């Protein structure tokens, strides 16, 4: 496991390049977002996604969300109507996960067989840049149903396993995951505030 320290406000191209390389090779990266630290894997690498489930001790029946680089990239993984796009522009980038109808390109391992997918565009340059070549998983870096921590050292101790790379920006001073809003039905529905 490699730990790379940086600042949340700094885009260190060498760190981003190295992290993308790890993700492209099927690795798992612990990275900061605008809410909590996340576990990232290339969504198109089944083994890497399985590693995320294993690390979190998460049921394969619980879907993972996807992080994309920008609002335009949402179209790669989800079907977005014009009115939905306007809603997304109001809130993204930001601390929200939007549930949308998925495109066939999204692997079943991500969605647990559902026809919808959670999508994030966080207000965090580091996180968004990790997804500039391909979408990555975004799920809080904690054991399922356990406390969400804001410090990489404590997170790694809780997970009790090695991720391939850690982007350490210190404490995030937040242990609140993103709000979840379901846009896949007729009316928007708040799932988690």
Image: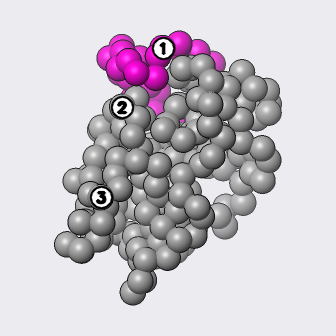
Residue behind mark 2: 125
Tag 1 or tag 2, which sits nearer the N-term?
Answer: 1
Q: Which residue is mark 1?
A: 6
Find disc 3 in the rendering and name its residue: 90
**Camera-nearest residue between 157 and 32:** 32
Residue at 78% x, 44% y: name it: 147
Is residue 24 shown in magenta?
yes
As drawn, is 35 to the left or to the right of 130?
Answer: right
Q: Residue at x 46, y 23 (%)?
A: 8
Vertical relation: 40 (above or below) 57: above
Mark 1 or 3, closer to the camera: 3
Q: Residue at x 53, y 13 (%)?
A: 5
Seen at 42% across and 52% down, the residue is: 120
Q: Quadrant of residue 132?
A: top left
Looking at the rendering, the stretch of residues picked out in magenta corresponds to 1-30
Say if 90 sits above or below 82 in the image: above
**Element under label 2?**
helix
Element type at marker 1? loop
Compare residues 79 and 92 and report the one nearer the observer: 92
Q: Gap in Å between the C-alphas at discs 1 and 3?
A: 30 Å
């Amino acid at each position: 496991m490699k730990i790379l320290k940086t600042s949340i406000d700094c885009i260190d191209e060498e760190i981003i390049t190295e992290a993308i390389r790890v993700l492209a090779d099927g690795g798992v990266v612990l990275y900061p977002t605008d809410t909590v630290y996340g576990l990232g894997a290339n969504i198109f690498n089944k083994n890497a996604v399985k590693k995320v489930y294993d690390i979190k001790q998460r049921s394969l029946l619980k879907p993972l969300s996807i992080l994309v680089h920008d609002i335009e990239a949402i179209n790669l993984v989800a079907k977005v109507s014009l009115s939905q796009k306007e809603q997304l522009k109001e809130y993204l980038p930001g601390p929200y996960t939007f549930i949308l109808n998925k495109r066939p390109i999204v692997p079943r391992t991500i969605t647990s067989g559902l026809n919808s997918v959670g999508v994030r565009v966080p207000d965090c340059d580091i996180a968004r840049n990790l997804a500039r070549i391909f979408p990555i998983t975004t799920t809080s870096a904690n054991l399922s149903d356990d406390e969400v921590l804001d410090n990489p050292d404590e997170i790694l101790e809780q997970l009790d396993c090695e991720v391939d790379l850690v982007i350490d920006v210190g404490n995030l001073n937040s242990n609140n995951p993103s709000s979840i809003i379901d846009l896949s039905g007729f009316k928007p529905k708040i799932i988690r505030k």
